[in-house]
Amino acid sequence: MDLIRRFRALFAWTFVRKKGPWTYFENKVTGQRRCRWDGTRYTYVDYDFIRCGDIVEGPFGREVVSDYVTFSPALKS
């Protein structure tokens, strides 16, 4: 990434939405997404919006979302 694009990425965070105690942001230059917890109650993060490699700043600190499976297929009987 060139120097100008890297500098622009610092200021390209835009508000997307607020859902419960979570506020969701997206960087218009890099495409990275971030959510921040406001400290009130705890609910689940919207993992339909957050992707692998994005940042979650929650009650347990700052973490990068890893690749994982969010559901398991139904067992056939």
Image (cartoon, rainbow, N blue to C red):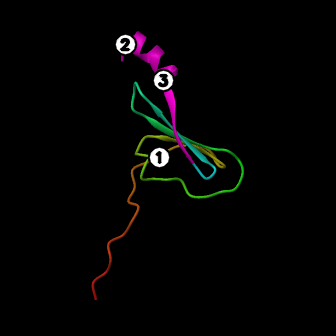
> Does residue 34 sit above or below 67 in this rendering?
above
Secondary structure at numbered mark 1? loop
> Does residue 20 sit above or below 57 in this rendering?
below
Q: Is residue 75 rendered to the left or right of residue 52?
A: left
Please give the range of residues in magenta.
1-18
* Label 1 Cα neighbours within 10 Å, binned few <14 / some 14-19 / many ≥20: some
> Does residue 39 sit above or below 32 in this rendering?
below
Q: Earlier in the sequence, mark 3 or mark 1?
A: 3
| Residue on which the image places disc 2 | 2
| Residue on which the image places disc 3 | 12
Residue drawn at (45%, 46%), measured in percent from left and top?
A: 50
**Position of the N terminus by quadrant:** top left
Residue drawn at (71%, 47%), measured in percent from left and top?
A: 39
Circle 2: residue type: Asp
Decide: marks 3, 2 in contact (CB < 8 A)? Answer: no
Q: Residue 65: which numbered mark, if any?
A: 1
Q: Earlier in the sequence, mark 3 or mark 2?
A: 2
